[in-house]
Amino acid sequence: MKRLTRFALASLAAIALIATAAAQAGGARKQNEAARARGLFVSKKSDAMSILVLKVTNGTLVPVDPSTEFKAGDQIKIQFQSNFEGYVYVVNIAPNGKRRLLIPSLDATDNAVHPDERYDLPSGGSAIEFDEEKGTEVLQVIMTRGRIPYLDAALKEPDQYLSDSASSAAAELQGGIATKKVTSVVPQNEGNQVRSRDIILAQGKNKDAKGSVVAIPDNGGDGKLKAGEIAPFEIRLKHQ
Amino acid sequence: VIRVLPARNSVAMTAVLAASAVVVCLLALSASSAQTPNKEAGISPEVRSLVRQAIASTGLISVRNSSDSSSQGPRPRGSAVVVRSDGVLVTNYHVILNTRTTRSYDEIFLSLSGEGDAASSSARYRLKPLLINKDYDLALLRVESDASGNPVPKSFTFPSIEIGDSLKIKVLEDLFIIGFPEKGGSSVTVNRGVVEGKDLLANWIKTDARVIHGNSGGAAVNSEGKLVGIPTKVLADEQPVDKDGDGFPDGYRRYGAVGFLRPSHLVAAMLAQLDDKDAESQPAPSAPKMIEPRTLINVRGLVRSAPGGKPIAGALVGLLPLGEVTVTESTLLTWASTNADGEFKLNKPVPPGRYTLKAKAFARQAYTLDIEIGPGSSPLIIEMRASDH
């Protein structure tokens, strides 16, 4: 009986050691991937974008962790910087699933982005405000080399809602769009609400610690978006 | 929900842009409603002949209550069309419904006139309701006797119309509306239009052909002279106008109207039910059989990745008639997009049955599956795979 207990304890210790080693390896891999994403953004070897969530605090914009739980009345802005010449579309997915095009908008129809330039969502002195309806708000950001006709068409829809009418929903379900196939090297991380989907992701540097970078892996030197391809990713904002 | 708060100096521009958008929409609406199909285009002699045959099957429905004074004759209520040569005909339920008693009128008559005056026609028959579908506003009736109550010989053959396949009808196909509208008195009136659209879920065909009071229950035939719809209702697009400029609407301007037909496949389904009932060889009940309104089902579900099972936000899910390949405004029955947790609820409930489900999401392969939806169905689980390229 004693021998059996000793064996069980030894087995548990071995399993614990293996688990710790795996966690350390996972952490190191994550660090490497974050460094790689940032490197790709700076070197412009891949198409990439940095994102910063800014909260209006005492009249000034303060960078915040995207996993912050926002309250009704909180106001934020999202700041983007692209390292490539292309277009960016931003779609808000409300807690009830309704989708609304935020970029481009009737106020700012030009959604072209240029390397090393910063863009604000919304532009100018405007801000995004959380109202009383709670849930998770998703900002779906789509990087592309060319325009996406069905998203452009949403500008003509009432309040820029996507697939609100049968004709626009049918056009979206019937139409096809090629998506950049890249391997997701960073798994979903509960602590980081900027979620990667077919892109790699990194936390920002120390000076803007709450910012993040998304980049297309340059596997085989193919980190650039081609015509007709898109790279989507999501920013999830909790609204309590 | 989040909303974008405009900066103070951009509010005025937003208002100007919004106002412009409304004006453009109204202008577009006005222009489209002003359009009419080219009704000058000739009708071939063959089509003319087939439509005339359909006229012979269409009659005037008149009604009276048993409590009416003997001097009061039957009052015109609408139209009907004979769909079986043994004297079975179809009309709208609202044509034979006495709204005061919420039951059918006590006495219902059909006058067949060909191209003559139905009021003075000697071919007048007393009718009996057989099968009523309140949900579709349709009723099947049978000729019970002539107007005086004398039985009609069993060998008598009524001029009946052939039922066409309304499921195959296409937008812009020619339509001829045959009936006895109020404005035309008791003589048959025929006018022409096209199929403007259809809604397979709610079982409607839309037409620009003129449909007014009295057309209800009559015939909408195609260029082969086959019955494809029953004129049932009309919706007018009326907008308030402020004629004296005091800021308050004091009238309405009419921009156009759309006629709605019940497709003939619904009539065919009711006739099949009638045949089943006849096959049971039971004595006909004194009251018509009522078909209860259909149960509609709200469809919910979850979209997640495969493999992995992570919820997919922003995926678009839609239902089409079973086997439908092309997604268009008229084939898309109901749809919704998923929230942050991958959950969705389709925007219109659907009757139980089989459907083709389609889903689309960024970076995912398009998804298609034939499914069955019933009253006890569990939420749909849709697993979408990553794109291949």
Image: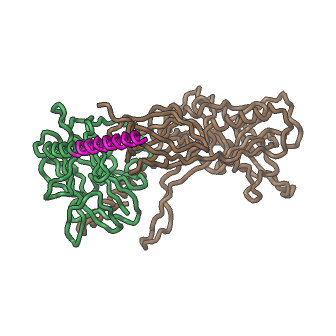
Q: Main secondary structure of the magenta part?
A: helix
Q: Which residues are magenta?
A: A1-27
* Residue B76 on the magenta span: no
Which x, y percent locates residue A20? 27, 45
The vertical placement of B221 against B232, above or below, is: above
Q: Which residue is depicted at the point 43% across and 72% down?
A: B247
Which quadrant is home to the N terminus of chain A? top left
The vertical placement of B8 against A30, above or below, is: below
Q: Colour of chain B?
A: brown
Relative side of A9 to B256, left or right: left
Which x, y percent locates residue B321? 53, 36
Task: Give the image's coloring scheme.
Answer: by chain
Farthest-out residue, front:
A2
Question: Is residue B263 shown to the viewer in this render?
Answer: yes
Question: Is residue A86 shown to the viewer in this render?
Answer: no
Which x, y percent locates residue A175? 36, 37
Farthest-out residue, right:
B150
Residues B136 and A90: in front is A90
Residues B27 and B288: in front is B288
* Residue A21 on the magenta span: yes
Relative side of B149 to A116, left or right: right
Chain letter of the green region: A
Q: Which residue is depicted at the point 35% across and 40% down?
A: A11
Residues A167 and A59: in front is A59
Residues A36 and A115: in front is A36
